[in-house]
């Protein structure tokens, strides 16, 4: 009845260094999204350049490549109904000063340069970004989440 999709989310190095990984993951889990992939890693130069290819040539690009490699990230793949747009909604605007209160970036960050979280901006970007960071065998999707089960149940009441 509803279509599920996947998105790529990362707690950026500032979020990891500040010890707010759990707080950030919690926002997505509470919403009901299912974590189907999760790992901490040091981003390579190749991964950073592939991830941010659309920003190459912009003034902030060199700093962005340095930032995403400045320490480990926590990368994850989330699955859920309309998760690409929904996760972006929970994250808030790129600049924490413009982000709505209650969003991750408004609540946990001060500067757009260091905005603690990444999320794919479209289903196509998500598919591309997931491949940069995860092998297919690292994604676990056996069993339904409680949220999926409840939604399926309610659809059939
Ligand atoms: P998004 O992360 O909200 O999708 P994008 O425009 O795709 O925002 O930019 C990617 C990342 O580049 C941002 O999350 C932020 O870390 C950084 N960034 C974007 N615009 C600026 C800027 O004007 N100055 C510095 N860093 C920026
Ligand atoms: Mg973006």
Image: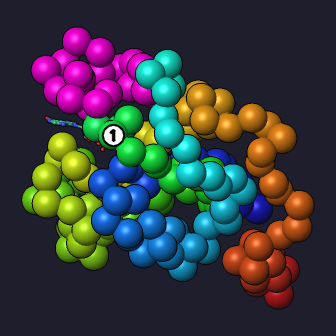
Is there any visible trace of residue 140 in the rendered image? yes
> Magenta part mainly helix, strand or loop?
helix
- Residue 69 vs 47, above or below: the answer is below
Identity of the residue furthest to the bottom in this view? 157
Q: Quadrant of the C terminus?
A: bottom right
User: From this viewpoint, is residue 125 visible?
Assistant: no
Q: Quadrant of residue 101?
A: bottom left
Q: Position of residue 142 (x, y in %)?
A: 89, 61
Q: Residue furthest top?
A: 57
Task: Say whether residue 151 is left or right of residue 126.
Answer: right
Q: Residue at x 22, y 49 (%)?
A: 114
- Residue ID for mark 1: 70
Q: Quadrant of ligand 1?
A: top left
Q: Position of residue 137 (x, y in %)?
A: 83, 41
Decide which of 27, 15 is in the foreground and name it. Answer: 15
Residue name at image x 54 percent, y 79 percent:
30
Q: Picture coordinates of residue 18 (x, y %)?
A: 31, 65
């Amino acid at each position: 009845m509803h279509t599920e999709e996947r998105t790529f989310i990362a707690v950026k190095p500032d979020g990891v260094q500040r010890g707010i990984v759990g707080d950030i993951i919690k926002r997505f889990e509470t919403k009901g999204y299912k974590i189907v992939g999760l790992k901490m890693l040091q981003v390579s130069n190749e991964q950073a350049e592939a991830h941010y290819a659309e920003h190459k040539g912009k003034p902030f690009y060199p700093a962005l490549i340095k930032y995403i490699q400045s320490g480990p990230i926590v990368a994850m793949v989330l699955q859920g109904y309309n998760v690409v747009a929904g996760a972006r909604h929970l994250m808030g605007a790129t600049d924490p000063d413009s982000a709505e209160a209650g969003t991750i970036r408004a609540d946990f960050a001060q500067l757009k340069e260091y905005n603690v979280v990444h999320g794919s901006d479209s289903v196509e970007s998500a598919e591309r970004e997931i491949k940069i960071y995860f092998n297919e065998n690292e994604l676990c999707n056996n069993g339904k989440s409680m949220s999926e089960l409840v939604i399926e149940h309610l659809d059939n009441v």
